[in-house]
Image (cartoon, coloured by chain):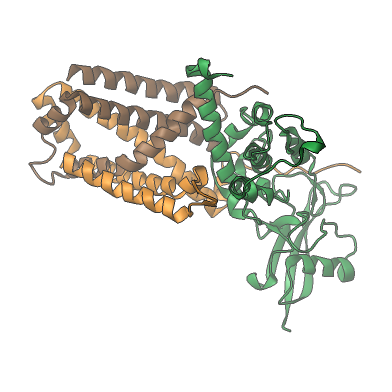
Chain colours: A brown, B orange, C green
């Protein structure tokens, strides 16, 4: 038996699971407020742009998005198998490609800001 | 005489057979919401990079029944993910103090406390 | 002492005459203090001597009377009649082939258990005259809970991943490997990692957690497997990103 390479993805999955557990509910609450137009003062372009323009803000955004993507991608791979689809290789390529694409786009937009 | 009878699980319906399997699948399915939500964030980031008008367009698009419904679904899924994640931390990462393990509810409680603080910070920054 | 008439629905399978299993119902006068194993013994002694099942100690130590009671993996000697209604369904342990009636084939588990080398592999040979390997209470505490495993296989019956992917090494075997890996006297982790850090090893686990919920000895195999994943992941990153760390 050979040692598995799953630790690469599992490491990101576990780190991402922790980060999303701490942060995603609060983020989703904010975007929910934004979607409901709770208050005109919140979620303004100026404030968010200022945060994303700072190198520390960029780093935080990149870290959160990267780990969320790879957490979700790996768990999706497992979940698809759990629902009875037996095409793990293909599913892995699709979900990890999505996560990779999202990672690159995030990097690109952040550098653009 | 050796003629063992093999029973097999249904590949597509096994998780309907026990409540604990349903809870597990509910936990796993939260990732689909987090996956989709992360792409929403990336889209928002793109519009942010494109300038104030583009970002306002993003907010306008978000301001719809579908946008509210989606964010609400993500919020519920994310909270379910958080609780299911924190509740098993003592199993995955037990901590020893001297000759004893730190009781599980202290480890879980500490995670909930940090979660509250982090959420507060994110909300203050975001609102 | 109160007595209750219990309908015991037992899955029967005779490999010599049956092509598939069928339920047989027995009406058993049960004392309220009884466990399901007592009811089965009553059937065997008074109603139907052909009923086959495994049991030995009657006190949750030997691990041989594992079966599905109302669909839940249980030790029949620990399943009290007073916790059930008047109708109880008994099936052989799920996810294992049925040999006869409630007797399942355990070969797969035994082979897997043996493959993880569940015994002390000392770091270096030491003559008896050098004395015993000493261990502090804290070092003992680290793995003690895993030593309580009685190999009853309830965790395998609860694990859907084992049911779906029979190659999976499974909860008890990996927990046992973890037990020795955590032992301060042991030096065999590298050998065990070759088996448990494979795809069919710990990586087939998705932390359903059912194994720990049904474990009659509170071994918490699910916890052990997550700890093995964490340790194996650290190994992988060390090996591939920091090759100079390799011994």
Depicted C108 relative to depicted C148: above or below: above
- Which residue is outermost to the front? C129
**Where residue B68 appears, x then y in whole percent?**
23, 43
- The answer to whether residue C152 is left or right of residue A77 is right
- The answer to whether residue B112 is left or right of residue C131 is left
Q: Quadrant of the N terminus of chain C?
A: bottom right
C210, A89: nearer the viewer: C210
C25, C68: nearer the viewer: C68
Can residue A95 be seen here? Answer: yes
Depicted C244 relative to depicted C169: above or below: above
- Which residue is outermost to the top? C244
**Where residue C207 appears, x then y in whole percent?**
54, 42
Can residue A91 be seen here? Answer: no
Depicted B65 relative to depicted C216: above or below: above
Q: In percent of the image, x 54 and y 48: which residue is there?
A: B21
**Where residue A29 appears, x then y in whole percent?**
24, 45
Q: In percent of the image, x 43 and y 25: which residue is there?
A: A95
- The answer to whether residue A2 is left or right of residue B4 is left
Q: In percent of the image, x 35 and y 47: which residue is there?
A: B79
- The answer to whether residue A42 is left or right of residue B91 is left
- Which residue is outermost to the bottom? C1
Q: Quadrant of the C terminus of chain C?
A: top right
In which quarter of the view is residue C101 placed? bottom right
Q: How many marks?
A: 0
**Where residue A24 appears, x then y in whole percent?**
31, 40
């Amino acid at each position: 038996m050979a040692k598995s390479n799953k630790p690469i993805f599992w490491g990101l999955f576990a780190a991402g699971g922790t980060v999303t557990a701490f942060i995603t509910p609060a983020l989703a609450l904010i975007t929910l407020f934004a979607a409901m137009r709770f208050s005109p003062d919140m979620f303004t372009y100026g404030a968010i742009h200022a945060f994303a323009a700072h190198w520390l803000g960029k780093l935080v955004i990149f870290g959160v998005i990267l780990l969320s993507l790879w957490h979700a991608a790996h768990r999706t791979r497992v979940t698809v198998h759990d629902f009875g689809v037996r095409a793990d290789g293909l599913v892995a390529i699709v979900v990890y490609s999505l996560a990779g694409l999202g990672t690159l786009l995030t990097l690109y937009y952040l550098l653009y800001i | 005489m050796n003629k063992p009878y093999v029973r097999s699980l249904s590949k597509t319906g096994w998780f309907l057979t026990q409540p604990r399997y349903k809870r597990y699948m509910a936990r796993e399915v939260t990732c689909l919401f987090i996956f989709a939500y992360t792409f929403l964030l990336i889209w928002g980031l793109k519009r942010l990079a494109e300038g104030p008008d583009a970002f306002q367009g993003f907010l306008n698009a978000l301001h719809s029944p579908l946008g509210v419904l989606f964010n609400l679904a993500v919020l519920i899924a994310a909270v379910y993910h958080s609780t299911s994640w924190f509740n098993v931390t003592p199993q995955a990462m037990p901590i020893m103090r001297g000759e004893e393990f730190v009781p599980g509810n202290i480890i879980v409680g500490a995670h909930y406390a940090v979660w509250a603080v982090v959420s507060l910070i994110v909300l203050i920054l975001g609102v | 002492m109160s007595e209750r008439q219990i309908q015991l629905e037992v899955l029967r399978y005779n490999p010599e005459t049956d092509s598939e299993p069928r339920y047989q119902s027995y009406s058993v006068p049960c004392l309220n203090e009884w466990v399901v194993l007592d009811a089965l013994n009553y059937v065997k002694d008074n109603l139907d001597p052909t009923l086959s099942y495994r049991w030995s100690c009657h006190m949750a130590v030997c691990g041989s009377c594992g079966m599905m009671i109302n669909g839940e993996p249980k030790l029949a000697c620990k399943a009290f009649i007073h916790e059930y209604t008047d109708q109880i369904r008994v099936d052989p342990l799920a996810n294992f082939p049925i040999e006869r009636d409630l007797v399942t084939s355990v070969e797969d588990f035994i082979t897997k258990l043996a493959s993880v080398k569940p015994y002390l592999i000392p770091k270096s040979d030491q003559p008896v005259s050098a004395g015993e390997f000493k261990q502090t209470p804290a070092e003992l505490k680290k793995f003690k809970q895993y030593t309580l495993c009685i190999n009853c296989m309830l965790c395998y019956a609860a694990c859907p991943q084992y049911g779906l992917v029979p190659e999976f090494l499974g909860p008890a075997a990996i927990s046992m490997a973890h037990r020795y890996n955590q032992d301060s006297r042991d030096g065999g982790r590298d050998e065990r990692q070759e088996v448990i850090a494979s795809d069919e090893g710990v990586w087939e686990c998705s932390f359903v957690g059912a194994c720990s919920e049904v474990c009659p000895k509170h071994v918490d195999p699910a916890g052990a497997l997550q700890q093995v994943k964490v340790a194996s992941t650290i190994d992988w990153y060390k090996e591939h990103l920091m090759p100079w760390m390799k011994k």
